[in-house]
Amino acid sequence: MNIAATTPRATEIQSMTRSDTPLVRFHGVRKSFGELEVLKGIDLEVASGEVVALIGRSGSGKSTALRCVNGLERINAGELTVCGRALHGGKVDLRDLRQDVGIVFQSYNLFPHLTVEQNVTLAPRKVHKIGAAEARDLAEQVLAQVGLSEKAKNYPEQLSGGQQQRVAIARSLAMRPKLILFDEVTSALDPELTGEVLRVIAKLAAEGMTMMLVTHEMAFARSVADQVVFMHQGRIWESGKGDMLDDPQTPELRQFVGNGL
Amino acid sequence: MRGCALSYEFDFSFLNDYMPELWHGIWLTLGMTIVSIVPGFALGTSCAIGRLYGPPWVQRIVTIYVEGIRNTPLIIQVFWLFFGLAVLQVRVGPFPAAVIALVINVGAYTAEIMRAGFLSIPKGQLEAAACLALKPSQSLWSVQIPQAVERVYPALVSQFVLMMLATSIMSQISAEELTGVAYMIQSFTFRGFEVYLVIAVIYFVMACLLRLTLLGVAQVSFPRRRRLGTPL
Ligand SMILES: Nc1ncnc2c1ncn2[C@@H]1O[C@H](COP(=O)(O)OP(=O)(O)OP(=O)(O)O)[C@@H](O)[C@H]1O
Ligand SMILES: [Mg+2]
């Protein structure tokens, strides 16, 4: 039988991936900037290994929702649990949280005064205190993952936008996060460079990385995401598998998809 | 037509007679400049950080210090320090007193320059550092200070050259630097015009050397600039 053939290790891994505590759990999350309520009660769960795409119009609260997950924004009400840590009420150890949660920004935000290799290894060296040799191996490994091994000694300004964004992804990977957040990481790129970045993200998804990504690339969301979340006016308007984009249930999503295609 | 102002005869013989004194003045000027640069830079950078990120009471103290120094003459600060220390029964020689005054003075100007440098770093850089789980101190050392210094380096160089030129008042507290030596020589030789012409040239050369040295330091400190030839 199948079960007999399964090694204990494999069972353990299976039970881990099958475990029902989600990596991220929004429950009635609200967030305001002054008078403006940007998130009006968000409920969302992201399981380990899952890829969730957040879509929606400008100003619908996608970035805010994403930024709450690694504590860049603090929620005002509701419950938010990320990698076993409650981000509501009480003190939150953000540095501890951010060792598990990586983020990649639209504007790359690479450190311009450091080489690609130094960019990638800065945090592991300072935070995880790894040695020089280990750092070199780590850089080699994560740069290979994004297909930029030969650029290790270059400076960010010597790279194209797409390459810079791939370095930013490698920089995130080097911290060995449990979850990576992507906020419109291809919006500053032309279509050709967008493709090379999306391919890297799709590869990570296939390797089982848990990801939440805000994106305007509908085709990508449909094909890569396990869960697509359409946000509208601070609420989750509609969510489902990628194919929900083919059959919108609400006029808002229908209009959004119509405009996007 | 002898005796007419137009037929003034230059006499540079003091160059021979007072060579040791001139060298001594040059060394003292260079010495107090070079000794003051690193502590002055450290003080200024600390103050900039304190004013930007410190608790309110630190911000207030730094602001008072910076504005107090930037809005009073150096020579008054020097006297105040020199005679103030004497009142407190603290005995310091002219050279250490001059260095302390210079550090305090250039620290205030450096604080403003570095503050501008820190403020010019895009917010995304700080966010990226924080999101990589770096501590605020690690972010400062590895991300912010290097970028801030690189951005304001030309202004820092100018400030340190100005500081060197400003040492010319230090003979007032009997630190016999170059200008003090010049005054002494002209009072013996009555060749003020020639003396101060020579002194001006010496200052000019020293200022150029200091500039070149500091640019050399930049070549070593900013590997990116060395690699890419990024202009400062
Ligand atoms: N720090 C802030 N202070 C005040 N208002 C903010 C802040 N950040 C976001 N907002 C406001 O919150 C609303 C939602 O912003 P958010 O960035 O989450 O939208 P988004 O869905 O990511 O939009 P886009 O597609 O344009 O990035 C907007 O109206 C925005 O102006
Ligand atoms: Mg956004």
Image (cartoon, coloured by chain):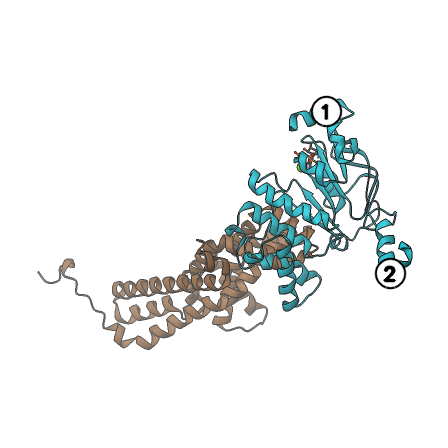
Chain colours: A cyan, B brown
| Visible residue check, residue A152 | yes
Residue positioned most to the top: A251
Residue B39 falls left or right of residue B181: right
Dot 2: few (<14), some (14–19), or many (≥20) neighbours within 10 Å?
Answer: few
Percent of width and height locating residue A68: 75, 43
Chain ID for label 1?
A: A
Q: Secondary structure at mark 1?
A: helix
Disc 2 residue: CB within 8 Å of ligand 2 = no
* Residue at image point 62% right, 64% down: A136
Name the image quarter holding residue B104. bottom right
Residue A254 is tagged as 1
The residue closer to the viewer here, B210 or A86, is A86
Q: Is residue B38 above or below residue A205?
A: below
| Residue type at numbered disc 1 | Arg
Chain ID for label 2?
A: A
Residue A7 is tagged as 2
Q: Quadrant of ligand 2?
A: top right
The residue closer to the viewer here, B229 or A7, is A7
| Visible residue check, residue B67 | no
Residue A258 falls left or right of residue B33: right
From mark 1 to mark 2, how far is it between C-alphas? 48 Å
Percent of width and height locating residue A158: 50, 52
Dot 1: few (<14), some (14–19), or many (≥20) neighbours within 10 Å?
Answer: some
